[in-house]
Each structure stands twice: as C-alpha cells, then as structure tokens.
Image (tube, rainbow, N blue to C red):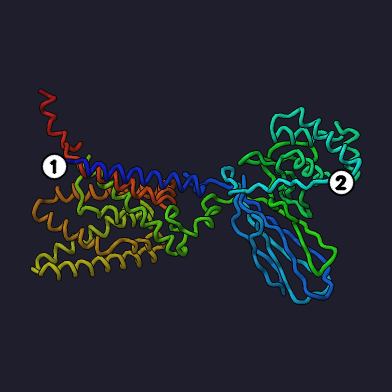
Amino acid sequence: MSRLPFYLIVALLLVAGIALSIHRHLQFEVPWTPGEQRQIWEIQAQVTFTAEGGPVKVNLALPSSQRGFRILTEHTASPGYGLSFLEENGGRRAEWATREAQGNQQLFYSVQALVAPDARNGGVEAPPLREDIVWEPPYDTAASQVIERAWARSADAYTFARQLIRDFTEEREGENARLLLTQFDRTPLLVRLLHQAGVTARAVSGLRLEDGRRRQSLTPWIQVFDGSDWTLFDPRSGTQGQPDNLLLWESAGESVLEVEGGTSSRIDFAMISRSQPAAAAVRSQLVEDTLLNFSIHSLPLEEQALFQTILLIPIGALVVVLLRVLVGIKTSGTFMPVLIALAFIQTSLLTGIVGFLLVVAVGLVIRNYLSYLNLLLVARVSAVIITVIAIISLFSVLSYRMGLNAGLTITFFPMIILAWTIERMSILWEEEGAKEVLIQGGGSLLTAVLAYLAMNNPWIRHITFNFLGVQLILMALILLLGNYTGYRLLELRRFKPVTED
C-alpha cells in the first residue's frame, strides 16, 4: 500500500502548524520565549474649556495604531456628557455632547500604546493636491523664488521637501523666506508651498513621549507623500523620518480639538512609561479571535488556566511515544505516566514521587488481600478505588497533623488511574512475578518524571499555550513515530554476544 497519503498528511500538519505559529508571532507579536518585557505608554489627554451655559459639543482627534505603536485600550471620563467615537476623513475622533453646561469643564481621555517596532500603518490615503493656491503681491514672487531655489537642488518629493524646509531655518533663511513668515505661520506655509510645487503634503500633530512628563502639548509635523509611501518632516529643522518616541495623535490633516458652546479651550497631555510581560501586553489584541488568530485568550481566566494544563498533555504523549517506540521502556498502562506527570505538576516532583510510591505500595498490599476473596472484577476494582481514596485521605490527614503541608497536595493524584494501576500491577505480580512489576512500575515512574520535566518547562508551557499551531506539529511528529518499525534501543542488548564473538 502506498505511503504517499500518509506522508502528505504529515507534511500538511507540519506546514500548517509552523505557518500558524509564525503568523501569530509576526502579526500579533506574541513572543517566542516567556519573560519578554514590552514597553507601554499610558497617556492621558485633558481637555479644559469654559462653557457658556448652553449646548456644548467637543470634538477631539484620537490616535490610531501606527508605525512603532499599537493602541491597546482607551478610556474616557466625562460626567454628564454623551460620548461617540467617529471615523472621519481617515482619522478617529471622539465627540462629547451635552444639552447644558456652565463654567469650567474638564474632559479626560486616556490610552495605552504598546511600543511595537514591527507595527505598520494601515492604508493612509494621500490628501488631494491643492490647485487653488493664490498669493497676493509681493508674496507670489517670494513663493515662486523659494520654490525654484529648492527645486533646483532636489531630485524627488522628499529631497525637495527637505531643501524647502531648510531654506526657512535661521541658518539659511533668506529675504523671501522672512517675508513669507511675516504673513503666514511656518507649518501651513510650508504645506502650501509644497502643494504649489506639485508635492502632496499635509500638516499633522504628534506627541513626543517622555516618561513622567505633565502638561505637554502637541507639536506640528509635515507628512509628505511620494507615490504610495509617506514620511514625516520636522518643519523647524527639516529632519526627515519619524522619531521613535513620536506618537502621531492627529494624522488626517484636521484640527486636533474643536469646541462648540465654549471658550478658552485647550488640551494638555500627561504620560508615563512602564514595562510588563509581553504576553500580557498583547493579550487585549488576542481577545477578538479570527480564523488565523484562534487563541485561548478569549476565554475567562479560570478556563484559560485549565487549558494551559490540558495543552501540555500532547507534550507528555510525545515523551511516552518516544520512550516506548524508540527506547523500548515498558510502562503500566499506555498513557498513565502522562496523568501522573500532570499530578507531579500540582504536587512538585519530590512530593509527587513519594506520594505515588506510598499509595501504590499500600494499595498493592491491600489488593493482595482482596485477591483471596475471589471477587468479581468490577467489585474488586471498585474496592481498590475506595481503598485508594482512603489511603490518600489518611496520608493527607497524617501529613497535616505532622505539619507537612506538602503532603496535602497528594489529593491531586488521579484516583481512578491509580486504582487501575494497582489492579494491573497486582495481576502482573501473580502472572509474571515481582521482577516484571518492578520493571513496568519503574518504567512508568521514569516516564512520568521525564514527561513532568518536559511539561513543566516554562518555555514549553509558553509555546503550547500561546501557539496552538504547535499541536499540529506534535500530531505530525507522533504520526511519524507511529510509523517506526525498527529495533528499540533496549532490544539492541540482545546482540551483545555477537559483538563479543
């Protein structure tokens, strides 16, 4: 029979698992290793104004995820005001409204921004090129000469913008530039000159992030478009590029704050930086699952903790398959060691081993007595289950009385599995002898310890919980191991006499 379909299935599982894991890491920035820290900026905007006693409407520009930053959460505080979030001209805005307000008013907006170097802007549409620019004499001549001077020393939109801005700095400011600055503000003037030269641009507002700063204000920047891409320019120095600590607060070329029904409006910013584990920093992005972002993070925390343990079982299963198929270790029950390893995770390794040996040893003694009663299998196993429960209860009480609180965790052992383990070992003792019991019991304990070491590794716990594609990879590996029909390592000792000869 052809094995091609089998290998195709294995290859499909491997490719799907690896692709899902890489997509999750790149698209949602889930870290590969535990303990990674991410920087988060908490920014609060305070809008203050004086209401005139009638209806009030306040419209504030809001930041969006962009180059270097990803917006996580946002909150507002505005007693007595209705609040709506709007999408206007490619930008996000918040609008507060009330029927009546009098005197000093304060509105608060806070946002958490994750520093994400790999984050990119969504589709940013270039504004239409203005063709209705009209200058009054003598500003028309000055504008033309400034444009001609910068155009001759440039090669494209970006170099032209850089040269034009530098001609308005103090070091290179000429008579034409000084004349224009007496009539126009710097940033709107530069945008107007760029449009007249056929270069699409607009004024945007950015917030420089500095830890622990209060009463900060936005600074103007110029966004210059060149085909499908854009870049920022500092209108004061001509520096090109977006600084790492600059968050674009308003990037649609609109006003930052509009207040109707009030006067003396202003906006101030306070900010603070902190670090937190990367997994927690990106958790809010993972709540809304999609087909490619299927995660456990959308579940309540109690269920998340449960699945964090359940998703470790395939790791234990892989260890069991490796030891049984390749090494040849015998165990009592196929996957009983995996369940014992899960109990070790709850009890700690040393306490778990001691508790496992005590329960099994006492259980075997009592099971040996039950064999003389000639009970039916169901009744005998039920009696063993009750015996195991009694043994665990007794050990828990005794350990508590002796001040050994670690002994209380013995209750995490799977009682049904222990009962069947005792039953199998007792039958094995009667049929094969004590040696075989020690071999299988020791193999089960060794397998459980190795599975525990693999399942309790922080790196493995992180990977299995945050990258569900790993489950497909484990499935592919187990299928490949299941196709192995060669010698086991422990079987090779049969050939020792051949090597001696």
Using residue 158 as the reference point, say whether residue 449 is left or right of it. left
Pick the residue in front: 34 or 491.
34
> Is residue 381 in view?
yes
Q: Which mark is residue 206?
A: none
Residue at the spot x=71%, y=36% of the render?
A: 240
At x 91% / y 42%, what residue is drawn?
137
- For mark 2, what is the residue? 184
Residue 214, by quadrant, is bottom right
Classify residue 185 as left or right of residue 46. right
Which x, y percent locates residue 216? 78, 52
Mark 1: few/some/many CA within 10 Å (<14, 14-19, 20+): few
* Residue type (three-letter) at the residue carrying disc 2: Phe
Q: Position of residue 91 (x, y in %)?
A: 66, 55
Q: Pick whichever, 467 or 121, lies toward us.
A: 121
Q: Of the residues under marks 1 and 2, which one precedes in the sequence? A: 1
> How many badges with numbers are in the image?
2
Residue at the spot x=30%, y=65% of the render? Answer: 392
- Percent x, y of residue 315: 33, 49
Viewer-nearest of discs 1 and 2: 2
Mark linked to residue 1: 1
Q: Where is residue 1 in the image (x, y as percent from the top left)?
A: 13, 42
The relative height of residue 117 versus residue 100 in the rendered view (above or below) is: above
Query: Gap in Å between the C-alphas at discs 1 and 2?
Result: 83 Å
* CB within 8 Å, label 1 to label 2: no
